[in-house]
Image (cartoon, coloured by chain):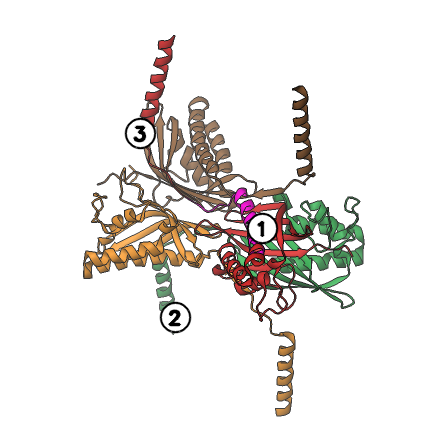
Chain colours: A brown, B orange, C red, D green
């Protein structure tokens, strides 16, 4: 029986060697976005919000602002030129935050140029859940629409309607190019 | 002088013939979206809304509904699978209109399956103006964010925050794949 | 201990039921190309060539031509406007086959407009193997470069250098938009 | 008359002020490729070849190699992972140059790892003309197929069949991601 096993193993090895004569590795560049990457990018955004919120509670505003700056730099596409960002709670003439400074102010406030911003990420959030209604993967960009549910440390929940467009950049990282967030219509 | 002119003309013709030996036309397929195409698609959406509104006022609901159906079929991408559509005035659990039937109901109402829809296009609109804050052309898709200003026959104006993602389809036509519309935040 | 286990299980089940209250299906449109789809499209091209060759041997030229016409219609993108096709064995001024008629003639010959075409698919092929050197997936298009090895019924093998660009069309099908095939350089 | 002029100027200024109430500039990111950009990128490739050839003749191999390195870095997409490059005159097992080192060796030779490369760019070229048969712009990528005609300082011309796929990178620059070049089939 031992011999039989060895024979089978040898034949298997031979057949592997003969059918794969040292083929060169296929080189690949892949700019397509998968659904998993989209879901991960959404969850990353949620996790980042909780991180900023927790950092603010534990380490103060300066630390939270530094973290927010870092996150905006890596998760959004401002360095590509602009981002199409309509945060939930902004008003004219500063509704759209097409610069990273405007985005930073929305998340952590404290910028005299944006006097109405109190800092959305500073609201004691401890849970953030995306819930997609629909996804459109165009290729190297992907669009999503749905709800995001925020829960603060007191257990109070806020839901918003949210659209995102993600771009896979040259390094393979997903970046937010469009972000439209709005309060739910109250039906009145 | 006449002779000189003729000589020059003959040389010119010869040089044309010799330098351009019946070059074949370059065949082209272009799926890239230009900014002009984006602006035209936005204006087309606005014009369609006014058309439906006017048709309703002049010819009644059945005509307006037929026109809306036609417009949704040609301007949106429902036949590609779905559209990421969050209209301005919808509520849970029918916030997102991922089917053409849901879109039709939003614009002209009268569908028992969507009892809260009164028909957004039936509000006597006679002016509709897009105002972009930012545009991201990814290639064969383009995203926009900004305001759309609606004026009705009484001169009353409503402004909404609006994001669109357009896809250039295989026939070269732009189709709306994402449409997120929301009332302006009242700052409260 | 058994009871404890049961209690834990019941709590777990309850928490699953309560946290997932009949979530609506997420609607999806996906125009991104996966590597698997690229490899399948290459193999489909190979299989189609063998099919045409076999059909010619068994059923004659008319059947082979009809099959080739069908395959070109479904595998290439001529109906999108043109295809960037440089077959292996074409010469000036008919090197590039930017029309489906030119492609058909290359594969099965018999067209007086392309007198040099003898029909590449009619050469008794019975094996066709793509071997990629590199793949670039841009999103809704993908490019490949490498060898294709053809073996005829006598066991003779021909290898060519081949590039393809595939497009995922609106229906989700991959279509060849560029096809450049060339004999191996003989080093002289 | 002076008064009239002033009145006109005032009215003009007023009308400018009233009709353009300080509209914010629309921010833009455009990753779509235009036909002009494609043609420019092809011509850039040709000009680069002539530059390397001229530098070799005037300044020697080291200078030509340094220039070629710089050009490959900026014109090809090797830093994105790989390039699908099949030069005109390469043979197995080094047909495909998926690394920048392999591309550099093809253009200027002198690399022991690629012993068959004599340096294509060192052949006294002084003219290089692309001639497209067809172009497919997919969005942020574009494919071309056609001839490139090379003329050396003695007036001898060589024509090759050439396919390119260009990608517009995150900085807006076109980079070659696929390059398939082949000698014309001699019809034998």
Would you say residue A95 sits in the magenta stretch?
A: no
Tell me the mark number nearer the camera, choosing from 3 and 1.
1
Which mark is drawn over residue C21? 3
Q: Quadrant of residue B95?
A: top left
Chain ID for label 1?
C
List x then y, in percent, for residue A46: 42, 31
* Quadrant that contains the N terminus of chain A: top right
Looking at the image, which is closer to me, B62 or A121? B62
- In the rendered image, which residue does mark 2 sit on? D5
Q: Disc 1 to disc 2, how far (Cα)? A: 77 Å
Q: Disc 3 to disc 1, how far (Cα)? A: 48 Å
Q: Which residues are magenta?
A: C29-53
Crowd around label 2: few <14 · some 14–19 · many ≥20 (10 Å)? few
Please identify the dominant SS of the magenta region.
helix
- Name above or below for residue A46 compared with residue B87: above
Would you say residue C31 sits in the magenta stretch?
A: yes
List x then y, in percent, for residue C89: 65, 61
């Amino acid at each position: 029986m031992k011999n039989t096993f060895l024979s089978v193993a040898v034949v298997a090895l031979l057949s592997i060697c003969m059918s794969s004569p040292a083929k060169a590795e296929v080189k690949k560049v892949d700019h397509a976005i998968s659904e998993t990457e989209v879901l991960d990018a959404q969850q990353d955004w949620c996790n980042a919000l909780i991180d900023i919120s927790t950092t603010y509670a534990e380490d103060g505003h300066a630390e939270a602002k530094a973290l927010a700056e870092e996150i905006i730099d890596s998760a959004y596409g401002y360095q590509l030129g602009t981002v199409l960002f309509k945060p939930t709670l902004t008003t004219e003439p500063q509704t759209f935050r097409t610069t990273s400074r405007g985005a930073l102010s929305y998340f952590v406030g404290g910028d005299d140029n944006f006097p109405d911003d109190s800092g959305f990420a500073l609201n004691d959030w401890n849970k953030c859940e995306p819930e997609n209604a629909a996804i459109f993967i165009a290729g190297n960009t992907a669009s999503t629409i749905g709800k995001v549910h925020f829960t603060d440390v007191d257990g109070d929940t806020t839901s918003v309607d949210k659209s995102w467009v993600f771009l896979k950049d040259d390094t393979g990282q997903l970046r937010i190019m469009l972000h439209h967030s709005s309060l739910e219509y109250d039906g009145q």
